[in-house]
Amino acid sequence: MRIDIVSIFPEYLAPLRLSLLGKAVRDGVIDLGVHDLRAFTHDRHRTVDGTPYGGGAGMVMRPEPWGEALDSIMESGDSGVRPTLLVPTPAGRPFDQRLAHELAERPWLIFACGRYEGIDQRVIDEYAERAEVIPFSLGDYVLNGGEVAALAVTEAVGRLLPGVVGNPESLVEESHSDGLLEYPVYTKPPLWRGREVPAVLLGGDHGAITRWRTEQSMIRTARTRPDLLHPSQGLTVPGLEDAELRLAEPGDVAELFTLTKACWVSEALANERLDIPVLHETPAELAADLRNWTTLVLRDHGRLIGSARGRMGEDGAFEIGRVMVAPDLQGRGIGRWLLERIESLAPEDAGELWLFTGERSSDNLRMYRKAGYRPDRSRQVPPGARALSKRR
């Protein structure tokens, strides 16, 4: 892969010569070129900026040096290869692991590291005819220039190239590779300052270790990045746009207990049974289940309005349970949204998703059928319940 970076501070890019990326450059895996934008100026002061037309604060980078720099770089390359021009800007596409994988497939990347208030828009428009132009952003904050972004993206992309990272398997297991954050990691010694390595990692049961790591990834993602749990970034039900989805905590038990009972009254009536196990559950039992399940709670301005939970089984299937919505908010698509959210926690190696509901719970059965679930008689479920499953 060829990578060219244009900046008024070329020394800023020196770290790319270090560590694994530096080795990749020395080995020829990456053809790296760093270019000083001021080398393409022709006045005594090597001017690269000017005041903005229309007024406003700050300075704008002039198009002339950028045009000369990009022309020079593009003319030095293979005429049959169309470069990808990457422009760091707070107004660009959010950079994520998916985009990193996309860029790793490109043969030639050029970074235009702007400064001040940015680069004259005509530069972007001009080179959109000669290259694939991707304005991108590292996040919802502002930096002094694009060099930090160029460093970050070059490392994120470069390490995906064959031969750069020694153990390719580590690229699969790390954060964001499957939509979840990476599980906690440990090494020697087994006891440090009174803190022990989790026993499951020392037992040699690889199946148990995989399940533990999956569960920890799910918990970490639900706690710190619930926006990753499903491609849909938020609940779009009118009036509930600000609802917050997060991992259940011990402090949620009392309200979760009340919501569960309220939701299962209608289940008892629909199925004409009072022996449904959840109706006889105690708060202590519910609290204990928080340790055995990954439970999500949905709150709107502090009020608990919904919940769902999931866990990996020893058979390699992902079990979903207690998809519930406050009775006064049912019928608005919240339950289906919660189902999708908890489904997204299932690891990629979970070949099947399954759940159960009442045999006469017509609304539930209809929702699950629309979501792709079908009757599954191979599962043991409580009396009066029906198991449903679907393949991944």
Image (cartoon, helix red, strand yellow):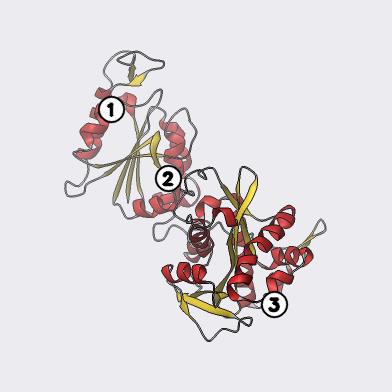
Real-space CA distance between mark 3 and mark 1, rounded to the nearest whole angstrom: 68 Å
Helix, strand or loop for disc 2: loop
Determine crowd level at label 2: few under 14, some 14-19, many 20+ residues with C-alpha closer than 10 A.
some
Q: Earlier in the sequence, mark 3 or mark 1?
A: 1
Out of 106 and 26, give the one closest to the viewer: 106
- Identify which residue is drawn at 38% across, 55% down: 101
The outermost residue toward the right is: 194
Residue visible at 35% across and 51% down in the picture: 103
Relative to 72, 162 lies left or right: right
Label 3 with label 1: CB-CB less than 8 Å: no
Position of 42 compared to 262: left or right? left
Name the side, left or right, on which 219 lies relative to 43: right
Q: Position of residue 38 (x, y in %)?
A: 33, 24
Q: Which residue is mark 1?
A: 121
Amino acid type, residue under disc 3 in the picture = Asp
Quadrant for the C terminus, please.
bottom left
Which numbered marker is on residue 275? 3
**Location of residue 131 by image quarter:** top left
Q: Amino acid at mark 1?
A: Gln
Spot occupied by residue 179 in the image (x, y as percentages of width and height): 49, 58
Label 2 sits on residue: 95
In three-dimensional space, the C-alpha distance between marks 1 and 2, rounded to whole angstroms, equals: 21 Å
Sequence order check, earlier mark of 1 and 2: 2
